[in-house]
Image (cartoon, rainbow, N blue to C red):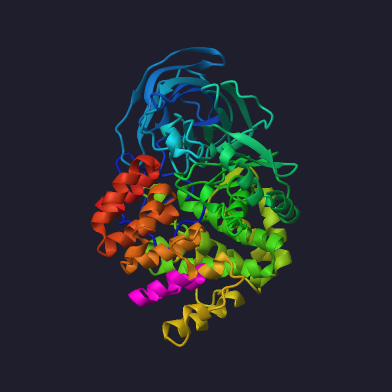
Amino acid sequence: MEKPPAATANQPQKDAAPGQKTADAEPKSGVDYHSFANTDDYRVKHLDLDLTADFDNKVLKGEAILDIQRLTQKNPSLILDTRDLDIKAVRAGVGNNLKDVKFSLGKTDPHLGTPLKIELPKGANRVAIQYQTSPDASGVQWLEPQQTAGKKHPFLFTQAQAIHARSFIPLQDSPQVRMTYKATIRTPKELLAVMSANNDPETEKDGVYEFDMPQPIPSYLIALGIGNLEFKPMGERTGVYAEPELLDASAKEFEDTEDMLEVTEENYGPYRWDRYDLLILPPSFPFGGMENPRLSFITPTVIAGDKSLVALIAHELAHSWSGNLVTNASWRDLWLNEGFTTYLTNRIMQFVYGDERYNMEMALGYDDLQADLNDRPDKDEIMAIDMRGRDPDEVFSNIPYEKGSLFLYELEQKVGRENFDKFLMDYFNNFAFQSITTEDFLKYLDETLLKQYPDKLSRERINQWVFEPGIPEGAPHPQSDAFSKIDPVRQQWLDGKIKASDIDTKGWTFHQWKYFLDGMPEKLTEEQLKELDSTFKLTQSKNNEVAFSWLMIAVRNNYAPANARLEEFLVGIGRNKFVRPLYRAMMENGMEDEAKRIFEKAKPGYHPLTVKVNSKVIYGD
């Protein structure tokens, strides 16, 4: 998933929720505290789905058949994860000989949903569950035609990470459980369905679509999109699905995807997922991107017209190695997913776009990390974070992303880039299609780099990175010459020594604009704001990253000329990286009534996750 905004609102530690595995003083390695599933007794190995998308009632309905592996000689009940599912019937047995069995739903937990307990016949290795989702399923968004680019057809997309797969499929919703899957998806005939599976670019729209995912994946990577979609190739193994109105612009913007794929293979090992395509979603998608295998889901907010925001594509592609191929076993271990991916993202950007772009991406990431470190309690600055009793959506901060990446960057600096690249390729090959813990990684590090370079690396230093808050003293500090020359110019303008029109911005990248704006003091005068806006047309900026940085300044300073653009931005975009910090800034700067009015106006078009996190910002818990 994309990197979250810097300095997001703190969420207080809560006591463990009922039903969680909480007896341990410290979180146990390999225990998933966010799943009810009894994975020590059974493991789901394959899933068969047959679902109909009912756009009138906004529900998915049909059947999920689970092939299970028994891990015990006893015959305990099978416990699955669900959230707001209407379970109609359950059958179980051996092979295709399935009979009705007893089932019950347990107590609902606000974070985890509801356990589904199924009584299995002896020797049963298959379970079939007939069910229907809720119109308010946390992992499914149903869009009306007016919320799409074409305005004529409805749209559906799912978002399963972190634990939202259970809201549209009853399963063992834990990243440590990997399964293959097949699916039949039934839709209105004028719409196309695509999944995180083998999508056929030549398929005809006929209302029934068959999918196969032959590689085992965790539940959070199961994904479905349905809409008025067309396909355009970008390379031999890459292409883009989008509404016709966005298709050409998307293919042009992301045309370097094939090059990214090839250079990543050259340096980190083979791409093992056949094709790599993109699905461009409506702007309500709550994230920049989601790394669903074979088909990354992408926000249209990164279509800037100049490829300035394609680091997001590099990030989601990098997950094909770090995250999808080698997966975190629990949400405590998320840094193994996102830290590695952020490191790889920067390297891919360097391979394709050069050193200057690489240095800017690294420097901005470091600044984002510093902002989060200044805004979070110590316990939330630990890479192997204790998430017991909390919503796992709260784990997504710059700590697992940027601190994890900076840790890997230090390892690279100490052992040498060529040696570290070899280590990474071996690491991906060694743990391919496995879900691992922080401790698994550290053991592997003991057996490889620490053994090879005992004079350059120490376990004590590594433990400090992983298990202690903050950044260890002497850690690398990525910087960019493209930014260092901006600091004195900004200061000269702030001191009144030069006018905004004297600043030579010709050739500035979005990174430089972001650095220029984000480095402004909290408060500016009305005259300064007007001068910046009239000179650089910031309120009208079409680059969403630049617009966001400017709107944050406008909100902090109650700059009224930007209010209409602020409302348009918040209503038209559901990406939490942008909307959550803006709502938070409004609440902190005397714009509470405006924040509530705009939120209520925008809420019908937001994803359930966007509604959830911003309701907390605006109305509290």
Q: Nearer the viewer, residue 245 or 589?
A: 245
Location of residue 4 with respect to 64 vertically, above or below: below
Secondary structure character of the magenta stretch overall: helix
Q: Is residue 589 left or right of residue 27?
A: left
Q: Residue furthest bottom?
A: 497
Location of residue 519 with respect to 249 vertically, above or below: below
Q: Residue at x 47, y 35 (%)?
A: 151
Picture quarter containing residue 201? Answer: top right
Q: Residue at x 50, y 16 (%)?
A: 93
Q: Is residue 82 left or right of residue 330?
A: left
Queried whether the magenta region covers residue 522, the answer comes back as yes
Q: Start and end of the magenta stretch? A: 514-535
Q: Nearer the viewer, residue 13 or 353?
A: 353
Residue 1 in percent (x, y) is at 52, 49
Q: Residue at x 34, y 23 (%)?
A: 104
Number of numbered markers: 0
Residue 486 in percent (x, y) is at 54, 78
Q: Nearer the viewer, residue 318 or 559?
A: 559
Queried whether the magenta region covers residue 316, the answer comes back as no
Q: Is residue 280 visible?
A: yes
Q: Residue at x 44, y 60 (%)?
A: 548
Picture quarter containing residue 418? Answer: bottom right
Residue 599 in percent (x, y) is at 31, 49
Q: Is residue 46 visible?
A: no
Residue 337 in percent (x, y) is at 55, 52
